[in-house]
Image: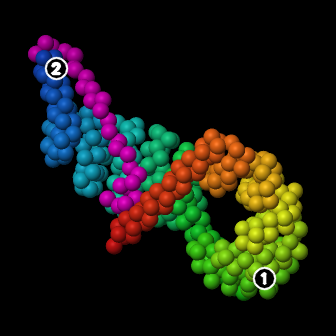
Amino acid sequence: MSAFSKSNVHFYVCLALMVTSSVGAAPAQKQSESADAKVQQLHSQALADEATGDTAGAIAKYQAMLQLAPTLASAYNNLGLLYFRQREYEKAVGVLERGLKVNPKMATASALLGICLSEMRRYADARPRLEAALRLNPQDNDAEKFLANDLIKLGDLEGAAAHLRKITVRKPDDQEVWYLLGEVYMQLSQQALSKMNAINPDSELVHEMSGEIMESMKNYDGALFEYKKAADMAPQKPGIHYKLGNVYWTLSQWDSASEQFQAELANDPHNCKAQALIADILIDQKMKFEEGVEQVNKALAICPELTQARVDRGRALLKLNRIQEALTDLQAAESATPDDASAHFFLAQAYRSLGQVRQAQAEMEIFSKLEESARASTAARARELIENKEATH
């Protein structure tokens, strides 16, 4: 089983094993009731075997149940799941297909069948099964994630993106879904770049998009090269100098970043992000707090929703001992982005300066929890990348 499936597939278990007794002569009825009782007994034994880790025993019990009750659809589902857990995908597929002939509307079996086929890299065969599972249960995140993965393998990137976006609405904190969505967008960008290269390989647009792709891959040297090419070819085009400056800012090359942001504002005086990053450099790196506040004021006058600019202004106001003003900015930033650890950190400083010890302690507790969560998330992501890398070898 791939690392992808290990981390995402929930266990599709159907526990309602109901057998309908036949109606007829007394001997036939007694025979049917006896079979029903045997099926229920085998079911209890299968569950007990699973609980103790005796998968082989549980499989044998479900096989015996199906000998007695071959129309018991949920038993096929559960047997297929056991084979899936054992990575015996061929056996799982055969069992699940028989179960779906008994009950075509069994969403769990359809989803499991699609996942098994996907694990076998039979992506074209898996697709209709996963689509059927989603029609029966549109909230099945695992089936939808596997379907998106299948569509990526089949080259239907737009379709994959549509499904991944749906999952992000239901599970906005699923980092893997955002990762896959980013991968899809990157591939779409690369396809678009290939088309653009075929039209004119040395156009400003080609260099600009190449820079964006390089930046998304954290190839900052490559991004600088491409953005510089684009800026040389279209020096007055809004946006290019901001992108170039943003890479310099990421690389902590503050003077070069400021120069590019100033060039951007000459082309587009309403680029509040460039204005805000100029302020950030003044406050965070050059300790020019009065000048930084002036620049933040300009940025927020254009874009009042820039939360990070409010945090920056709050920091500068703290340094200038304008505590009450700082408190207003930092409270607004915290309200807009409660998961931003820095807002809580500086808000704690503001409360402490005002002598509000209890509020300061509360904010520091939130800050510590957010920092711990961020570290745990980073570690989990690192482990996942290692597992995925190992799974491909």
C-alpha span from label 2 to label 1 = 82 Å
Q: Where is residue 327 in the image (x, y as percent from the top left)?
A: 75, 48
Mark 2 lies on residue = 33
Mark 1 lies on residue = 231
Say which of 12 and 356 sits in front.
356
Q: Which residue is drawn at 24% across and 26% down?
A: 19
Quadrant where the image shows the N terminus: bottom left
Quadrant where the image shows the C terminus: bottom left
Left or right of 21 on screen, residue 262: right
Above or below: residue 3 compared with residue 52: below
Q: Position of residue 371 (x, y in %)?
A: 54, 55
Above or below: residue 327 compared with residue 263: above
Kind of element beneath mark 2: helix
Is any part of residue 374 visible from this angle? yes
Residue 251's label in the rendered image is none
Q: Which residue is drawn at 59% across and 79% down?
A: 219
- Whether pointer 2 and pointer 1 mark residues with C-beta atoms closer than 8 Å, the reply is no
Quadrant for residue 184, please give it. bottom right
Q: Which residue is drawn at 38% across and 49% down?
A: 9
Magenta span: 1-27
Magenta span: predominant SS is loop
Is any part of residue 193 visible from this angle? no
